[in-house]
Image: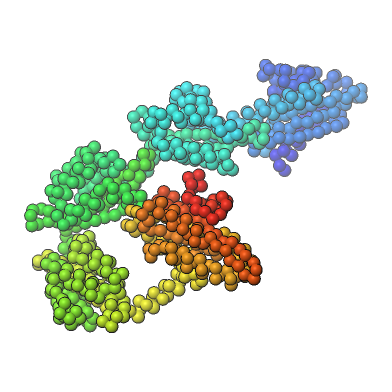
Amino acid sequence: MELAELAVEFVKKKFREYFIDGQKNTFKDVYIKGAEYIGIHSSGKAFKDSDVDNLLVLKRVGALDICAERYDTIIIDEKTCLVHGVLDVSEQTKLTRSIRFSMLCIQEKQRFKVAHAHFSAATDSQCEKLYEQLVLKTAQVALNEKRFEVIKNNAELILFDYYPDKDKVVFDKNIARKNGFPKTINRFLNRILAYGLLYKSSVADFLAAFDKIRGSEEQVETEIVVWRNSEYRMYNVRLQNIQVDDVLPICVMGIAKDITAEKLLVQEKQYKEILASKASSAYVVNINKDEFIEPIKTLPKEYAANVGDSFSKFINVFANEFVHPQDREQYLQNFSAENIKKRFAAGRFQYSFGYRKMIDSKKYKWLESNACLLEHSMTKEIIAYFQVADITEVKTNEKRMAENERYNKFLIESNTFVLEMNITKNIITRGKELLIKDCDASCSSDYTQQILLSAKKFVHEEDVSEYLATFSRENILQQFYSGNKNIYLEFRRRQADGTIRWMVCKLYLLEDNFSKEVKGLMHIEDIDERKKHELKLIYRSERDALTGFYNKQATQKYVEKFLNSEEALSGVQALLLYDLDYFKNINDKFGHLFGDKVLVEIADIVRNIMDARSIIGRVGGDEFLVFLPAASSQQKVLEIAELIVKAINRQYSKAGKFQEISASVGVAFYPEHGKNYKQLYVNADKALYLAKDRGKSQVVICEKKQRK
């Protein structure tokens, strides 16, 4: 049986015991209010049995009988039920008394007890008014009990009540007085902002939690950072709905718990895991403040730095005094605060790089720095952990014998175009006769000059820049000293008869055992048939059969590939979603074949508007995506979007029927509207639907309120 049914049966039994069985102790030790009507007794003491008798019956002459009864219930919580109603009690003298009652019943271990009772012989209007007071008071008691249950196990909690219907937060008077808090949330936030006590991002999180609790969510949690007593403190704020049925207005209890120690323990554990390595030295840096936090391991003399010293100044001094000149620029770039912030924003939290540290003018040793970037759990500042390890022996011995064997084996077995070169000296040492045969007399033993000549004479114009960048002497040396000893590039080669064929160029690098010079073996092979077959398969798998645009999966792949590249760290990138307005009418009026022709025509229009670098995809029936990877400005993006709207706006006719068609465009910019494809797509889609709601045939940029 349900709680209400059980409570009613319990109350009926109590009344039978008292009225019919004559058990006068039935309501002993129960707090009973009454006399002429409920609510006038305020002493809080239990009535005597005689007082109850005087209230309930005129005088017990003989047996009593319950000749009429009505029971109603209100559930207070999972163990408490209010039973109320009317009894008509008759005596042997045929006198009948109508008694109103309300009893608060609490279930304990499958049994009930009466915690509070009201009896009344008053008029209807008096009873209704006093009954409402009883219900309200009983509900408030239940509400307070719920609050107590939530906070009784933790004495550090700060309690406040939030009333969504009034959008008001009220702190307990004692808590407000103790902590200096104003009584309402708006004044509270304004005060701590004015004094710089709360991070602005924390204010946004705090207010966002209140926005969520106004909806259907029963419980919301967030974290805020406060500057208090000259240190950062972090609090976990939990908002929990504790409404008691419909008796009281909706009330949300807010609990704020200091979790600073827990957060610091978690972060300290992360730090120790990061630094548990064989690095010869390690140190921690606050990138935002440009200062050392602490050296974790003993630093060599040249690395000596104190807590609070400028990190950028230290890096510049060390680079100029100790880093090999050829590695200096790369070293400074990897350690620059700007580069570290870009990596962190792009989600690249770990990276490593090698460089040479000069011992004297001719000798050096190889060092490797491993960087791990974390966000401070409270201040949200970037904390960088750098480990420095000596990898000279590794560089010297790493797969030396295996590489020499591969080098010699390749020379014996290969029957393709092969060159040997000394990269350090910038000369071609073997294969010159092949160059003379292939290039007529226009060849050179100078490696750099020969790369330029071959690029100009043979390489397809669209591949020239990548070819020169990949096989430049500077890039080869940089790759080698960074640990990359295999360089690979596929490119198109112009043949003597004017045809274009796909080639692959593989460059294998190693260090000479004695001279320490960097040498290379270049292998060039014709892969035209295989490459064209691969491209054909890729094209079929990635393209929409009707429009020739990328399909949905390929579109996402290429956009994500760009967002994960170094190019995404600069310039303006935007994702545009456009949808054809009234396209369904085209299909309905003219048929699907005509609709397909319209899609092809519009696809050609958009294709002619975009440049070669743009990524265009069909992601739905009449929904298309355009990703602009290198726009000059956000204004230029909007101009392109408006151009799409203008170009698509047209009318079609067939058999005397006419139909207008237009386009609505939603725009999301990277990274402010999303740092990955999914976020950009969702926010551009929201902007698209807003454009349709505003009347179609227009461009709308993602708005802040849409992203919540």
Residue drawn 46% across the image and 40% down it: 205
Q: Is residue 269 visible?
A: no
Residue drawn 51% across the image and 62% down it: 648
Q: Can residue 341 be seen in this view?
A: yes
With 268 as the anchor, is 664 left or right in this view? right
* Residue 493 point in image, percent of width and height: 28, 76
Residue drawn 21% across the image and 54% down it: 330
Residue drawn 36% across the image and 34% down it: 232
Q: In which quarter of the image is the N terminus?
A: top right
Q: In which quarter of the image is residue 305?
A: top left
* Residue 127 point in image, percent of width and height: 77, 24
Residue 219 versus residue 120 in the image, above or below: below
**In this orientation, which residue lies closer to the viewer: 664 or 396?**
664
Residue 74 versus residue 386 in the image, above or below: above
Q: Point out the residue furthest to the front here.
A: 656
**In this orientation, which residue lies closer to the viewer: 195 or 300?**
195
**In this orientation, which residue lies closer to the viewer: 19 or 403?**
403
* Residue 68 point in image, percent of width and height: 85, 32
* Residue 348 point in image, percent of width and height: 34, 53
Q: Point out the residue furthest to the left here.
A: 361
